[in-house]
Image (cartoon, rainbow, N blue to C red):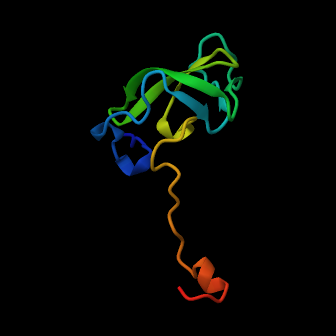
Amino acid sequence: MTNIVRDSNDASELTNPPFFAFGEKVRAKRTIRNDGTYAGKEIGEVLAKKGEIGYVTSIGTFLQQFYIYGIEFTESGNRVGMKKKELEPVIARPGDDEEVPLPGPTLSERAGGIA
């Protein structure tokens, strides 16, 4: 029997509600090309450019593991199914801008101040 390789160490996103909501404005994190599943376009043809803006028009699932977001891209006019890891919200959400501190000296310690 063939082993199915899945992303994210077999962790299921479906235990939580969808990350994106219907109508939410999103941005493609990378260029998306036709893998042969988009009718009417040649294999390898660009469906959405990196940074292109779109809106969530549908939310489905794939392999009982991932949410697939139907995104209608405004520039290209294409509607493409994408995973959460391929998208980012255009409008920042509370907590999205929090940076995780890195180990090492603080700014005041590097400047010779007292921590």
Residue 100: percent from the left, percent from the top?
A: 50, 63
Outermost left residue? 15
- Image quarter for residue 4? top left
Quadrant where the N terminus lies?
top left
Outermost front residue? 113
* 109 or 41: nearer the viewer: 109
- Which residue is pictured at 56% across the width and 80% down the height? 104
Count of marks placed on residues: 0
Outermost top residue? 40
- Which residue is pictured at 37% across the width and 27% down the height? 61
* 60 or 62: nearer the viewer: 60
- Which residue is pictured at 37% across the width and 33% down the height? 18
Residue 86: percent from the left, percent from the top?
A: 55, 38
* 62 or 49: nearer the viewer: 49
Residue 36: percent from the left, percent from the top?
A: 60, 21
Residue 56: percent from the left, percent from the top?
A: 49, 23
- Which residue is pictured at 42% across the width and 43% down the height? 6
- Reply above or below: 5 against 67: below
- Reply above or below: 38 against 90: above
- Reply above or below: 74 against 31: above
